[in-house]
Image (cartoon, grey):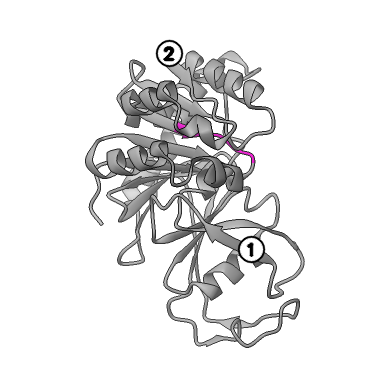
Amino acid sequence: MDVKGILIIIGGNEDKGINTREQDHLEFVEESVLARVVKESGGIEANIVIIPTASRIPEEVSSNYIDSFGQIGCKNLAVADIRNRDESEDEENIKLIEQADCILFSGGSQSKIVHKIGGSTIHKILLERFEKENIVIAGTSAGAMCMSKEMITGGGGKEFFNKGAVSMGEGLGFIPHLIIDSHFIRRGRFGRLAEATARFTNLIGIGLAEDTGLVVKNCNSFEIVGTGMVIIFDASELSFNNQASTKVGHPMTIANLKTHVLANGYHFDILKREIRVVPVTKTAKQESQSL
């Protein structure tokens, strides 16, 4: 799948540069996940549109992002405040999407995004522009999870690996190869992502820590950005998998689940399912710069 657009998929709670010391603020402007969003979008002159549809507090969320992007120096910011499906057909909102260099979906409920935007004119425009143009489509938390075709809609159970711990639905379908989970470390979501990958063994499970994201180009590889880790589940070579035969609510067993833990700067080839290791000399240089 060769597309021109870029996806930036963020695990939630990304640094927004709010209430930071001067040095921390400088690092936020230069090195934060949101700064990378701005860079990939073409710089501070880019047209950035925030879509807070997933949130219960869209005005507050939109205001926070406007402030955060403003601290980076962005000047062309707008909000497509879509709260019902009819507003996905609104001419003003459509115009914003057509002119945007970057779209950012906020956190909240991924199902809200799908129900109110999925299949709409705005969704169709985004899919077409993503395929043919150099647009950035970013999302954090729920806004990240909705980017896949097979989407986690809910589920929990930090201590259990039981069938039925995860519920699935159809996402916006920007990237078909992944199943994405957010707040992965803090909220203990190992079980539900493991079950999701056991159900869809042809897909790659992505568990994103907070303030951590993927920059996906051509839908065939991604780079890790941010301060946390990304957990990758590859179930393509399972030697045992009783997901299909296990009753709902009962413990599952899978064997030979390949797992990777990646940090900032490392790359992963989605099609080959291989890590691209950063050269030691580059890593050493980065470490020396941080001292």
Left or right: 147, with 153 as reference point? left
Label 2 element class? loop
Q: What residue did someone put label 2 on?
A: 73
Task: Give the residue displayed 30% in from the left and 67% down from the top.
Answer: 272
- Cα distance between the residues tagged 2 and 1: 40 Å
Q: What is the quadrant of the N terminus in the image?
A: bottom left
Task: Give the residue displayed 54% in from the left and 40% down from the top.
Answer: 116
Residue segment shown in magenta: 104-108
Residue 101 to residue 152: above or below: above
Q: What residue did someone put label 1 on?
A: 167
Amino acid residing under circle 1: Ser
Of tags 2 and 1, which is closer to the observer? 1
Q: How crowded is mark 1: few (under 14 residues within 10 Å), some or many (20 or more)?
A: some
Give the percent coordinates (x, y) of residue 130: 30, 41
Left or right: 194, with 120 as reference point? right
Task: Give the residue displayed 65% in from the left and 53% down from the top.
Answer: 185
Left or right: 130, with 198 as reference point? left
Report the front residue among 134 and 96.
96
Task: Give the residue displayed 59% in from the left and 31% down from the top.
Answer: 83
Label 1 element class? strand
Residue 77 to residue 129: above or below: above
